[in-house]
Image (tube, grey):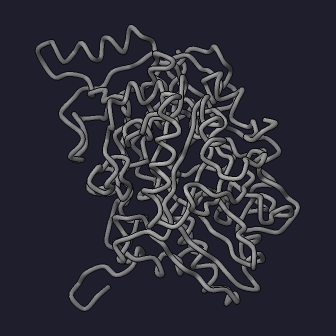
Amino acid sequence: MGADGSFTSLQDLIDATPDLASYLYNDTPGPHNRARAGLSPVPAEFSNWRDEQRAWRESAILFDQSHHMPELYVKGPDAFRLLNRIGVNSLANLNPGIAKQFIGCNARGQLIGDCILYDLGDQTYELVSSMPLLNWVEYQAQASGANVTIERDNNTSDNPTGRRRNFRFQLDGPSASEIFDEVAEGGTPVIKFFHTARVTIAGTGVLVLRHGMAGHAGVEISGPYEQGETVRAAILQAGAKYGLRQGGTRAYFSTLYEQAWLAYPLPAIYTGEDLREYREWLPADGWEGKFSLAGSFVSPDIEDYYTTPYDAGYGHIVKFDHDFIGRTALEELAQNPPRKKVTLVWYNEDVRRITGSLLEPGVPYKYLDLPVADYGNMQHRDEVRSLDGQLIGLSAYTGYTVNERKILSIAVLDAAHATPGEEVTILWGEPDGGSRKPRVELHQQTLVRATVAPAPYASAVQQMMRAPVGPSA
């Protein structure tokens, strides 16, 4: 703690907070611009979110990812060894031209975060997104004395330089490949799923990752920040005849309902004596001290909000071909994962009942803000129960997709109840009229009926997300 009584570390904050879960539930603003539009210069909508959602299914969409994702660069003789010790997935085939979904856990196999890992060559690696995981990597580098250098390029709202190192665009939708073919100078290479290639667009050298946000043969394009507008203009010009639209943040953050990505798990670092030194290293005003819990599930035990790679649907990525933090715990868990990620499809009648309460006297049900209805800052948890009232899991992200004409929730359920077609109920709204969060109005709770469905829910995602791009795609 500082001389003026202020908190200097996350551990200081925890020590002075009798009920950490309640503090995160009621009194934190949330660090991510998903629920705080002022943290990013990207507009909420370029046209309207309904047409922008349709674009990724019917034509093409261009998202600007340049501002909300932090990045970290690790370079040096020990860089690969460091990352291999942290990542639960295999890096055996990692080399320039291949990217990885990089996943880090604590020693108990609970998620700290996941991000995209690029091998840039010359013992240099780029990690994109997940501030808690980037913090964990930097701490492990320092604590282990690894022979590496670390460079941070934080998201725009947390970036002291006032600018980013790279621009980053996501081009997605059924026409994305054709548009990419037109703007890539000198021919388009075949790029397999989660592979990369270097191409030139509008005279600018860019790195392209075959990675779909919305279920089609999408590409993530990054390059020097100063050239971002030049590259954007070239893509928009080529895409005009294909019906390409720019997507705002409202549409962007609603892609996960069709894709079923459980983004930004609450980092499992708030408990455990083995993590005390890490919490003392973390600042009190960092992301870990600002996450905002929300929803009908309320527990005084912060560990009840932790998740594992198997909860998040990453079980197929966990590989025991190397030693990593959390291996022993995950080897045991892998024998019989107790929970499974699913999609919950809300009953239309209950959606109409909730929205209709706005027109009736008395306290309405919790407002369904569309397309993003969940109202925590990346940390929403609603109770999910069987028809006989048994608590069988938790629902996280909830929202609407015009492409499916449904309200969908991404949930983690007990494996015994994760069968498509099973009927369940979701408790929508917070207890006692709602928490102290500014985004939460006075409301009452209600039960919503829902049907268990696969994750991802959208058939387009299931069919297209791993297809390559390029001449023979």
Residue positioned 37% across, 65% down in the render: 156
Which part of the image, by quadrant, shows the C terminus? top right
Q: Position of residue 202 (x, y in %)?
A: 55, 55
Q: Position of residue 30 (x, y in %)?
A: 34, 55
Q: Position of residue 284 (x, y in %)?
A: 36, 74
Which part of the image, by quadrant, shows the N terminus? bottom left
**Measured along the vertical axis of the image, is residue 291 above or below residue 396?**
below
**Measured along the vertical axis of the image, is residue 132 above or below residue 445?**
below
Q: Is residue 118 visible?
A: yes
Residue positioned 60% across, 57% down in the render: 115
Query: In the current view of this chain or complex, which residue is farthest to the left?
Result: 361
The answer to whether residue 340 is left or right of residue 451 is: right
Q: Is residue 270 visible?
A: no
Nearest the camera: 306 or 57?
A: 57
Query: In the current view of this chain or complex, which residue is farthest to the top?
Result: 349
Q: In the picture, residue 440 is in which quadrant?
A: top left
Q: Position of residue 54 (x, y in %)?
A: 47, 24
Nearest the camera: 450 or 55?
A: 55
Nearest the camera: 42 or 227?
A: 227
Q: In the picture, residue 48 is in which quadrant?
A: top left
The answer to whether residue 359 is left or right of residue 148 is: left
